[in-house]
Image (cartoon, grey):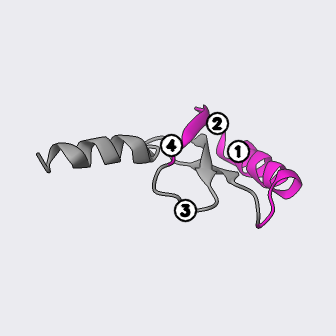
């Protein structure tokens, strides 16, 4: 499992960051819940999430650049 920083505002131009890899699932669930309970609110820009090992973090900037290559 991985822990990633996700965008709470659903912006297109946002890059998710992996902050931990190879995390035990039960530890990860507890850690993510504790961190979000302490640091997250409806107005927060970010939150953390536990995702599978094969999860590919979203990179809005790379998608913007790749998308522009197809228009020229």
Q: Mark 2 against mark 3, which lies toward the viewer?
A: 3
Closer to the chain start, of discs 3 and 4, is: 3
Q: In which quarter of the image is the N terminus?
A: top right
Identify the mark at residue 23; answer none if there is no mark.
Answer: 2
Residue on which disc 4 sits: 15
In-image side of 25 versus 51 (left or right): right
Residue visible at 56% across and 38% down in the picture: 17
State the count of labels: 4
Residue on which disc 1 sits: 28
Closer to the chain start, of discs 4 and 2, is: 4
Mark 1 nearby-residue class (10 Å; few <14, some 14–19, many ≥20):
some
The part of the chain drawn in magenta is: 14-42
Identify the mark at residue 10; answer none if there is no mark.
Answer: 3
Distance (Cα) linking label 2 and label 1: 6 Å
Distance (Cα) linking label 2 and label 3: 25 Å
Closer to the chain start, of discs 4 and 1, is: 4
Q: Quadrant of residue 62?
A: top left
Q: Could you say where residue 18 lies in the image, as x and y percent from the top left?
A: 57, 36
Q: Mark 1 against mark 3, which lies toward the viewer?
A: 3
Q: Could you say where residue 22 lies in the image, as x and y percent from the top left?
A: 58, 32
Say if the magenta span includes residue 22: yes
Mark 3 nearby-residue class (10 Å; few <14, some 14–19, many ≥20):
few
Q: In this view, does 31 lie above or below 11?
A: above
Closer to the chain start, of discs 2 and 3, is: 3
Name the element at disc 4: loop
In-image side of 61 versus 43 (left or right): left
Asked if the residue under mark 1 is in contact with the one under mark 4, i.e. CB atoms within 8 Å, the reply is no
Name the element at disc 2: loop
Q: Quadrant of the C terminus?
A: top left
In-image side of 7 versus 29 (left or right): left
Asked if the residue under mark 1 is in contact with the one under mark 2, i.e. CB atoms within 8 Å, the reply is yes
């Amino acid at each position: 499992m991985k822990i990633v920083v996700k965008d709470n505002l659903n912006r297109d131009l946002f890059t998710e960051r992996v902050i931990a890899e190879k995390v035990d699932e039960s530890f990860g669930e507890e850690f993510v819940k504790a961190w979000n309970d302490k640091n997250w609110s409806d107005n927060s820009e970010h939150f953390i999430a536990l995702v599978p090992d094969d999860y590919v973090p979203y990179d809005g900037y790379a998608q913007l650049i790749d998308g522009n290559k197809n228009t020229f």
